[in-house]
Amino acid sequence: MRRRARTALFLVAAVVLAAVLVDGLAGLPAFGHFHGVDGRTLDHVTVRQRHATDVVTAVNFDYRGLDTMGEEFILFASSVGLVVLLREQRADRQQCPDDAGGASGDDGRDPLLALVGRWSVAPIIVLGVYVVTHGQLTPGGGFQGGVVLASALITLLITTGGRTPRTIRRHGALEALEGIGAGGYVVIGVAGIFAGLQFLSNFLPLGTAGALFSSGTVISLSTVVGLEVAGAIALIVAEFAEHGQTPGVGS
Amino acid sequence: MSFLPFAVAAWLLLVGLYGVVTSRHLVHLVLCLGVVQASTYVLLISIGYLHGGRAPIFVGITVGTPAVDPVVQALTLTDVVVEATVSALLLAIALQAERRFGTVDPDAIRELRG
Amino acid sequence: MTALQAVILIIVAASGTAVALTRDPTRQVILTGLFGLALAVLFFVFQAPDVALSQIVVGSVALPAMVLLTLRELRRRASEREDAE
């Protein structure tokens, strides 16, 4: 279908969709007056039941832990799919000798920038570990902290303009990190079964609210999700960065 | 006036879809898809809001104070991270399409079929 | 609804429109960064700090890095194709 006809058809459909949306959204409770029973109950009982002060993290890893397991497997599947696609493209490229001469442009190796990038890796990792482990107390948790941890590698790659450090690449550290995270979630869930409760029950001691090691499995699940998210996002960016390198250089 | 958050969510959905339909570059398409995703986040967070409610964090705060709905926040926050990864997969597919068809224009790719 | 919330909603709608209507992907990435920042402020103002934290780290670090690296690869392939001709 030609572009103009397609756009016209879309505009007609958009008007209909807009009408349906307005009709549907008008039926919602007025903004600011939502009195969801689940939400209000959770706000009241979480601190007492799970000794966790951040209700959102407790919802993610305890009350709705099965949902989070599904979400993290979406993340796992996407990163695996991406790795398969990009590595196959790189293998194709290395078989064509004509491509070997292509220049990848300058590497952007400004020395000061590279120095700042290398020195910022450690503080970013410390911040990431802090955000991951304090998820049940203050805003944070596995997802946010995992991305912060991955951004340590991203910062290094962007400021040095190079590829992932050889030690990490050769030993598959990022893939292992991601696998441990994804599998660890299921292992902790199954451990709940061995403890005599249901899958993904909170069976560890709850501790006192406000202390670091509180709320049972919430902190362990948060940590494994943090590992998985960090591994996945770092792996994704490393694969993209590897792609832009001239093939056959270094290794 | 209190309809504004929902109106913004609906508007972002429609504008993002328009960007997807009229796109001429696969990467532009992925970023417009990001706008569509953002419309769902705005809708979810707006639904959970309570007038005079605080954030659902109770560090040093008595438990009874009214707080906004935490369930929609939990849904949105996992969604933000996971959808970024899905966008990355779409970018990899765009690279694959470029390798296969030599172009990143969705219309041109359609013509090259067969 | 407070005035701040209304202003932020308008800014989110405007930057979202700008992202969708910009054709050039490189410019669009910058606008996506701004859109992400506006979304993060929106989440803060709506009392959702967890979500705001998530949006900040994803929208300012992870997503722009991925898109820019993709664009770099596309440029590299285009220049390679020109060299070969």
Image: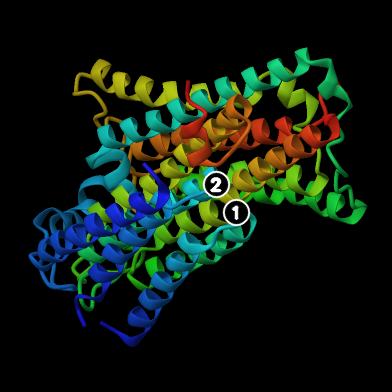
Residue type (three-letter) at the residue carrying disc 1: Pro
Work out which residue is located at the far top of the displayed protein and give it.
Answer: A95
Please tell me which residue is depicted at 77% across the width and 24% down the height of the picture.
A167
In 3D space, how far apart are the residues under numbered discs 1 and 2 (Cα atoms)? 8 Å
Residue at screen point 65% across, 45% down: A125
- Residue type at numbered disc 2: His
Element under disc 1: helix
Of circles 1 and 2, the one toward us is 2
Residue lying at 65% horizontally and 30% vertically, measured from the top left: A239
Q: Position of residue B35 (x, y in %)?
A: 41, 56
Q: Which of A95 and C10 is in front in this view?
A: A95
Q: What subunit carries mark 1?
A: C
Crowd class of label 1 (few under 14; some 14 to 19; many from 20; radius 10 Å):
many
Q: Which residue lies furthest to the right in this view?
A: A111
User: For residue C33, what is the image quadrant?
Assistant: bottom right
Q: Are marks 1 and 2 in contact (CB under 8 Å)?
A: yes
Q: Which percent across, then down, holds residue A209?
A: 33, 52
Q: What residue is disc 1 on?
A: C25
Q: Do labels 1 and 2 share a chain?
A: no
Label 2 sits on residue: B25
Q: Name the residue at 66% across, 48% down.
A: C68
* Foreground residue among C33 and A54: C33
Question: x, y (%) of residue C85?
Answer: 83, 31
Q: Is residue A229 visible?
A: no
